[in-house]
């Protein structure tokens, strides 16, 4: 399958640079995957589109201040480091810029030597494995020295940096937000629970696998990068109960989808933790999810391919064309889509 089949026209003015003032007042496009019918709503209307007994599964990963600015030792050359995945304590897979300046053995200093890093290996995706040395707690140090790593298509600083976290983010580890969840407020979650809609959480730490661009011509040749996930026993049990009783399991985002489908591919839904590099594209038979809440994704991206696998490529591309015509806001800080 040609990657160009997942391309579409998007005016730059529709790429959201700031979130809407209230999280749950983003626009919501509702797409019926059976008929292709499209409806325009507001996100907080999701409560009217869900039934008692439905299960929403959310990703509780928290974005860390993963972008660090340092100096190469001893030359003082400016180096930017993006933390991707913690391999073991003090050892991270990272992206570096400019990459040609960071060869194996190079040392980088951050915050007047408060944090030091040494490049020890190259990765197959053009990154580095770095060993960090420091006194104290790593998370506390990067909270002081790091920045939230906004995607490159966002050119403005966020007026409220906290808006790039979900209200239920708990477990630090992501290099990018699971953006489908950014539309939920504590009040909306409470209202959903009061209606009888169950909510459960998984963890997938968003890394290079989620946002790495597709650089090959054929979809099947793209290789996903591994990301760490966790599913606990209570959530696994709830998902099984919903599937057995015929209730809907609705994924809040592509990261949740990839986690649940990874676990289902390994056998029954049960508590698991590990690494996933699952790549979902048409045709794919979904084993767990019955509905999907998601944002509008980049052209030619693996996320658009996943959504196309769920709702059908032609229906999705038609919906995206309509979203452009109706001036929906696209990508991480933009509007949402509910595929039912």
Image (cartoon, rainbow, N blue to C red):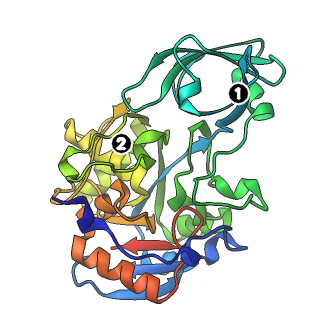
In the image, taking residue 81 as reference, residue 312 lies left or right, namely left
Secondary structure under the numbered disc 2 in the rendered image: helix
The percent position of residue 37, horizontal first and vertical second, equals 30, 87
User: Taking the image as drawn, is residue 224 in sight?
Assistant: yes
In the image, taking residue 15 as reference, residue 303 lies left or right, namely left
The percent position of residue 41, horizontal first and vertical second, equals 50, 85
The percent position of residue 80, horizontal first and vertical second, equals 65, 34
Residue 126 location, quadrant: top left
In the image, taking residue 193 as reference, residue 3 lies left or right, namely left
Residue situated in front as seen by the camera: 295 or 322: 322
Q: Earlier in the sequence, mark 1 or mark 2?
A: 1
- Residue at label 1? 139
* Front of the two marks 1 and 2: 1
Q: Is residue 92 above or below residue 331?
A: above
The percent position of residue 335, horizontal first and vertical second, equals 54, 73
Contact, mark 1 vs mark 2 (Cβ under 8 Å): no
- Residue at label 2? 236
Secondary structure under the numbered disc 1 in the rendered image: helix
Q: Is residue 249 above or below residue 267?
A: below
Residue shown at 57% from the left, 22% from the top: 102
Q: Residue furthest right?
A: 112
Disc 1/disc 2 C-alpha distance (Å): 29 Å
Residue 320 location, quadrant: bottom left
Label total for image = 2
User: Taking the image as drawn, is residue 272 in sight?
Assistant: no
In the image, taking residue 37 as reference, residue 210 lies left or right, namely right
Q: Is residue 29 above or below residue 155?
A: below
| Structural crowding at the residue carrying mark 2, measured as other residues with C-alpha within 10 Å and reported as few (<14), some (14–19) or many (≥20) | many
Residue shown at 52% from the left, 85% from the top: 327
| Structural crowding at the residue carrying mark 1, measured as other residues with C-alpha within 10 Å and reported as few (<14), some (14–19) or many (≥20) | few
| Image quarter in which the N terminus is found | bottom left
| Image quarter in which the C terminus is found | bottom left
């Amino acid at each position: 399958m040609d990657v160009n089949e997942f391309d579409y026209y998007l005016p730059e003015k529709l790429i959201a640079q700031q979130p809407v003032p209230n999280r749950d007042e983003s626009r919501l496009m509702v797409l019926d995957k059976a008929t292709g019918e499209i409806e325009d709503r507001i996100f907080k209307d999701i409560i009217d589109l869900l039934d008692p007994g439905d299960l929403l599964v959310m990703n509780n990963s928290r974005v860390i201040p993963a972008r660090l600015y340092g100096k190469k030792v001893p030359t003082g050359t400016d180096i930017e480091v993006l933390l991707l995945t913690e391999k073991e304590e003090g050892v991270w897979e990272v992206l570096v810029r400019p990459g040609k300046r960071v060869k194996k053995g190079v040392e980088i200093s951050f915050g007047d030597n408060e944090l030091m890093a040494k490049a020890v290996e190259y990765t197959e995706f053009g990154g580095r494995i770095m060993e960090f040395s420091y006194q104290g707690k790593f998370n506390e140090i990067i909270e002081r020295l790091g920045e939230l790593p906004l995607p490159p298509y966002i050119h403005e600083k966020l007026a409220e940096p906290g808006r790039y976290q979900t209200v239920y983010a708990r477990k630090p580890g992501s290099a990018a937000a699971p953006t489908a969840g950014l539309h939920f407020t504590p009040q909306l979650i409470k209202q959903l629970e009061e209606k009888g809609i169950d909510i459960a959480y998984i963890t997938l730490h968003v890394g290079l696998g989620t946002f790495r661009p597709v650089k090959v011509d054929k979809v099947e040749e793209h290789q996903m990068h591994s990301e760490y996930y966790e599913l606990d026993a209570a959530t696994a049990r709830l998902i099984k109960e919903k599937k057995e009783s015929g209730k809907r399991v609705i994924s809040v985002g592509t990261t949740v989808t990839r986690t649940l489908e990874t676990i289902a591919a390994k056998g029954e839904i049960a508590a698991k933790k590990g690494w996933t590099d699952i790549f979902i594209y048409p045709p794919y038979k979904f084993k767990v999810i019955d509905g999907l809440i998601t944002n509008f994704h980049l052209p030619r991206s693996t996320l658009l391919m996943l959504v196309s696998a769920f709702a059908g490529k032609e229906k999705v591309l038609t919906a995206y064309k309509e979203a452009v015509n109706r001036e929906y806001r696209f990508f991480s800080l933009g509007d949402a889509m509910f595929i039912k």
